[in-house]
Image (cartoon, rainbow, N blue to C red):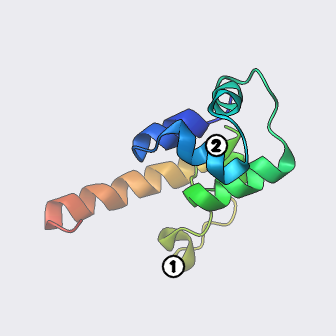
Amino acid sequence: MNRIKSLRTERNINQDVLAKLLGLEIAGVSKLETGRVPLKDEYIIKLADYFNVSTDYLLGKSNLKNFECQTCKFLDITGLDNEDIKEIQKQVDYIKKLKGIQ
């Protein structure tokens, strides 16, 4: 399962935009989104760059959208798994919400 469609709809982007980016017809994008056609390496790289997410996130292998997160720059997260990091991010979001920081 890949996350192309969810990323596209989250950003209000039409399939034709991705079709132009990848050099495909709209039907080709639909097939990529549904998994009827496997993603070529070049598409994975272009899409990850376009959406500013990791290739692992795009392919559904990680829940971290981007490994270059701000939290990672300031905290030693060595040895923590994705679930631990997600929990830390929830706590940070909660504190920011309490302080009115967005």
Q: Marks 1 and 2, how far apart in space?
A: 38 Å
Q: Quadrant of residue 38?
A: top right
Q: Quadrant of residue 3?
A: top right
* Kind of residue at disc 1: Phe
Residue at image mark 2: 19
Q: Nearer the viewer, mark 1 or mark 2?
A: 2
* Kind of residue at disc 2: Ala
Residue 18 is situated, as x and y percent measured from the top left of the image, at 60, 46
Instruction: Give the residue at x 45% y 44%.
Output: 13
Instruction: Give the residue at x 55% y 50%.
Output: 84
Residue occupying the far bottom of the picture? 74
Above or below: residue 97 compared with residue 7:
below
- Mark found first going from the N terminus, 1 or 2: 2
Residue 100 is situated, as x and y percent measured from the top left of the image, at 14, 65
Graded by Cα atoms within 10 Å as few (under 14), some (14 to 19) or many (20 or more), the crowding at tag 2 reads some
As helix, strand or loop, the secondary structure at mark 1 comes to helix
As helix, strand or loop, the secondary structure at mark 2 comes to helix
Residue 69 is situated, as x and y percent measured from the top left of the image, at 53, 68
- Residue 81 in view, yes or no: no
Left or right of 76, for residue 38? right
Left or right of 84, for residue 101? left
Left or right of 45, for residue 26? left
Residue at image mark 1: 74
- Residue 77 in view, yes or no: yes
Instruction: Give the residue at x 71% y 56%.
Output: 46
